[in-house]
Image (cartoon, grey):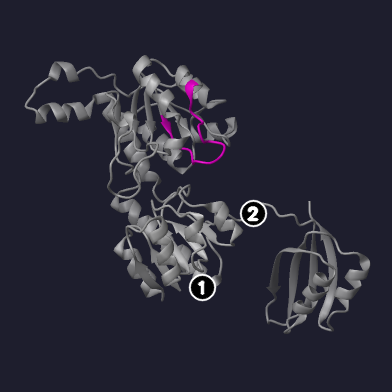
């Protein structure tokens, strides 16, 4: 199996991929047309990326079977185009949760104690103890969480250690689940903004979360509150955030930005990065040795599973539901050609197969095939299926809800 790695990737991961028999090519810095040309020329089965964008032109350039995002988010990959071409897209969720939570709390502490200004003043030979002694302190302050996935739950653990009560909202959070997590339930993101002294964002980017935190959210935030975003820039209306910083004294710690440069170096001229009330890091949330080793190991696991079984762990673009209305159950002897004859009958009846699996029993004498169909065959077709082969033992039909 040929694997093209288009971004920085741990050497330990490359070594493990080669150990399982993969032909690994590492071509860093390729973007857009250059990446598409490389995919066409080297014809990899698997493409591994971190920040590199994977548009349709790349997906259609060669014979890709799988794209692995060596990280959690996958908004840089044209998932819809991959789905149209039958290319799996997989990611590594949860492997960077601790790293991102650590950075989020680092930003929160920096906002409260004004650590960057302390450092800057000392480097300019200035001593300003009276100025930088004006911190609120985090103990007893309410931390608001937007999103309580794996990273959000890591934030709860750290908030508890700092003596911070937590109020949280996510689309899937219920009052019962909030009680289990030991947090207060909020009915909306705006409700979190009203009740929290500091807010940290930990939601994935999708159609429902794009622009989630806008002017209404920031209008509800308390004057002088802290806002931390280590998730995705597109979740936040940057103009509304800037207005809150300038007009309400909100202080922000950001690791992600609209139109940030792709890759490890470049020019960034966004206004938010220059704002006095904003501390920024360079999209480094997942960039710890621990997180990268864990992500590399998970990437190898995904590729090895695909290589050895055809299954793809963590696939993000499989249909949650298909148009199938019924399942044709065929109990049969495990002999060559039995299912081919069944499928010939279904095809002749112009019925579309949505999914199918064949389960073989111990001893490999008999098996049961489950064939999910878009429309139900009539009795005449069922009879033709039963008579398609002498090795067919029983045929039945199950309606799908």
Count of numbered circles on the image = 2
Q: Residue at x 40, y 57 (%)?
A: 49
- Neighbor class of circle 1 (other Cα within 10 Å; few <14, some 14-19, many 20+) is few
The answer to which of marks 2 and 1 sits earlier in the sequence is 1
Where 181 falls versus 335 (above or below)?
Answer: above
Q: Is most of the magenta stretch helix, strand or loop?
A: loop
Q: Viewed as shown, does residue 376 lie left or right of 205?
A: right
Residue 205 counted in the magenta span: yes
Front-lying residue, 20 or 123? 123
What are the residue bounds of the magenta stretch?
A: 200-215
Residue in the foreground of this view, choosing between 306 and 48: 48
Question: Is residue 389 shown left or right of residue 39?
Answer: right
Q: Examine the rendering and report whether any part of residue 382 can be seen.
A: yes
Q: Secondary structure at mark 1?
A: helix
| In front of the other: 182 or 216 | 216
User: Residue, x 36% and y 42% (percent of image)?
Assistant: 100
Q: Residues within 10 Å of mark 2 (few under 14, many from 20)?
A: few
Q: Position of residue 162 (x, y in %)?
A: 33, 30
């Amino acid at each position: 199996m040929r694997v093209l790695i288009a971004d920085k990737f741990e050497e330990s991961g490359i070594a493990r991929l080669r150990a399982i028999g993969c032909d690994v090519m590492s071509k860093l810095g390729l973007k857009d047309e250059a990446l598409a040309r490389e995919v066409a020329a080297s014809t990899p089965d698997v493409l591994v990326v971190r920040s590199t964008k994977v548009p349709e032109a790349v997906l259609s350039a060669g014979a890709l079977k799988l794209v692995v995002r060596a990280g959690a988010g996958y908004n840089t990959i044209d998932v819809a185009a991959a789905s149209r071409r039958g290319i799996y897209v997989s990611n590594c969720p949860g492997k960077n949760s601790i790293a991102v939570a650590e950075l989020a709390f680092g930003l929160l502490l920096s906002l409260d104690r004004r650590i960057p200004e302390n450092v800057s003043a000392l480097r300019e030979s200035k001593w300003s103890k009276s100025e930088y002694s004006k911190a609120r302190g985090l103990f007893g302050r309410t931390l608001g969480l937007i999103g309580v996935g794996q990273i959000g739950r890591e934030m709860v653990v750290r908030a508890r250690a700092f003596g911070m009560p937590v109020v949280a909202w996510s689309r899937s959070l219920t009052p019962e689940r909030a009680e289990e997590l030991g947090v207060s339930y909020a009915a909306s993101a705006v409700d979190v903004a009203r009740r929290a002294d500091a807010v940290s964002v930990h939601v994935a980017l999708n159609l429902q979360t794009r622009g989630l935190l806008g002017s209404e959210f920031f209008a509800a935030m308390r004057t002088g509150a802290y806002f931390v975003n280590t998730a995705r820039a597109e979740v936040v209306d940057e103009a509304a955030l800037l207005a809150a910083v300038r007009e309400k004294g909100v202080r922000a710690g950001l690791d992600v930005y609209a139109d940030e440069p792709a890759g490890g170096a470049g020019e960034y001229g966004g206004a938010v990065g220059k704002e006095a009330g904003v501390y920024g890091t360079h999209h480094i949330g997942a960039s710890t040795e621990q997180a990268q080793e864990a992500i590399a190991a998970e990437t190898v696991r995904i590729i090895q599973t695909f290589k050895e079984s055809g299954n793809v762990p963590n696939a993000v673009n499989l249909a949650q539901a298909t148009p199938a209305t019924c399942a044709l159950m065929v109990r049969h002897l495990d002999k060559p050609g039995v299912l081919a004859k069944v499928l010939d009958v279904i095809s002749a009846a112009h019925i579309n197969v949505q999914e199918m699996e064949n389960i073989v029993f111990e001893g490999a004498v008999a098996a049961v095939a489950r064939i999910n169909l878009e429309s139900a065959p009539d009795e005449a077709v069922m009879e033709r299926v039963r008579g398609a082969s002498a090795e067919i033992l029983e045929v039945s039909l199950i309606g799908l809800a």
